[in-house]
Amino acid sequence: MRRSLLTVCVMFALAAPVFAATPPTQKKIQQLEARIKALEANAAAMQKQTADALAALQATRAEVEQIKAHQDTAIAAAQTAPAESAAIAAAPPQTAPAGANGNAFNPAMSVVLNGAYAHGSLDPDRYYRAGFALGGGSGPPAQGLSIAESEVALSANIDEKFYGQLILTAQNDKSQDHIGVENAFIETTALPNGFGVRAGRFFSDIGYLNSHHAHTDNFYDRPLAYQAFLGSQYGDDGVQLRWLAPTPIFLEFGAEAFAGNNFPSGGAAHSGVGVYTGFVHAGGDIGDDTSWLAGLSTLHSKAKGAEDGFSGDSKLYLADGTLKWAPNGNLKDGGVTLRGEYFVDDRNGLYTAPAELQLGQSAFDQTWNGQRRGGYLEAVYRINRTWEAGYRYDKLWADRTGPYASEFDPSRNSVELSWLNSEFSLLRLQFSRDVPNPFNVDNILTLQYQVALGAHGAHAF
């Protein structure tokens, strides 16, 4: 009995440490189990994040591939649509989808600052052009330092159907500042079947250079033909209708009616409409490197006391052509531009001499029935993104009879070298040898600067 009791006591003593260790071991197990559950939760969250990242990566890759495919399609379409590059010349502005323009209520604003220093060997007071009056903005550039045509422009899509533009200009002429409204018009953007309408004050689309602003020219001054027949550039208050034909090449027809307040007209006739124009422009691509644009235009004026003394019917006919070549069509990095325009001016009316030449009652008045012509050819070589050089030859053919009859035909040769620091600034050095009459030669050296500030749209073809 004693032996059994002793055995039980020994066994109980040995078992006591085991029972004493049970509670803390169970707590540690519970802690480890909780930690395992937390690690499993973190692993599950990381797996979800990894899956989301992989899905986003795949979506981004798919979007990139879609953009690349769209770009390839656009390039292929451009190569199969030869008129597309030339169509930039007259395509109306496109309206952005509703809500896509975060700047919808703020017009695009830009400023073009243009100035020059010019020196001519001929005294401007002795300058005259045989066979042609110095009407409008024709004649040699102002001597010395001057502000050339600078402009402030505001433009915007008005809504989904209309676009508007206002351009104010400032320039110095014979030491006098002139500030005026160059453009102030509205234009449709959503008429069906390729039609477009413009109304207000704007440059006519006749010829090539006439519709372009002066700061986009390759030379400091306009060709002699533009000076002689259009006063450098014809713009007026009027309305324009044009139609872009649905053809494989760019083909546009248009007609305009103007008040006729400016040279070569002079005072609105027929209830405020004195000038009518018509034009057709066509263009396209020749391979990947060459683009072309050509046009035929006419301007019919019912002049009444024009600046050159003419009253009557005046018909001006123009033909223009432009050819551009550049590797892969990228003219910014180098290429050649060839351009020419030819003018025929046909007049049937009366000439009234200026008051300072009158002796008695219209002593110098006479009929004016005749034809004069003019034209120019120019070539510009874009050496690289920084430099370009150009040459232009101007020629006028005077009428052998009439109030400005002359046996001499004026001409001019011009060369220019331009340094383009960027798309927004340039310096141009130009030399011209002008032979305006049989007795004088005017050698003119011009240094021009030009900068553009603000949101300025791409230039036309």
Image (cartoon, rainbow, N blue to C red):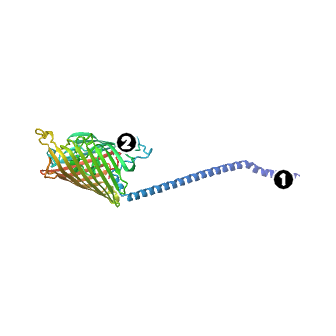
Marking on residue 316 = none
Residue 261 position by quadrant: top left
Q: Which amino acid, by three-letter code, is at mark 1?
A: Thr
Q: Residues within 10 Å of mark 1 (few under 14, many from 20)?
A: few
Q: Residue furthest top?
A: 360
Q: Identify the secondary structure beneath mark 2.
A: loop
Q: Residue at x 58, y 53 (%)?
A: 47
Q: Mark 1: which secondary structure? A: helix
Q: Residue 414 at x, y = what percent?
A: 21, 53
Residue behind mark 2: 107
Task: Tell me if mark 2 has few (under 14), some (14-19) or many (20+) residues whose alpha carbon lies within 10 angstroms of its own.
Answer: some
Q: Amino acid at mark 2?
A: Pro
Farthest residue in the right direction?
1
Residue 155 position in % (x across, y down):
35, 43
User: Left or right: where does residue 130 sit relative to residue 167?
Assistant: left
Q: Residue furthest left?
A: 359
In percent of the image, x 23 and y 47: which residue is there? Answer: 230
Judge by depth and name the residue closer to the eye, 380 or 307: 307
Q: CA–CA distance between discs 2 and 1?
A: 106 Å
Between 394 and 199, the residue placed more toward the observer is: 199
Residue 107: x, y in percent?
37, 42
Q: Is residue 226 visible?
A: no
Q: Is residue 8 left or right of residue 374?
A: right
Mark 2 and 1 residues: CB-CB less than 8 Å, in contact? no
Discs 2/1, front = 2
Position in image of residue 64 (x %, y %): 47, 55
User: In this rendering, does residue 81 appear at all?
Assistant: yes
Residue with the mark numbered 1: 7
The image shows a total of numbered marks equal to 2
Q: Earlier in the sequence, mark 2 or mark 1?
A: 1
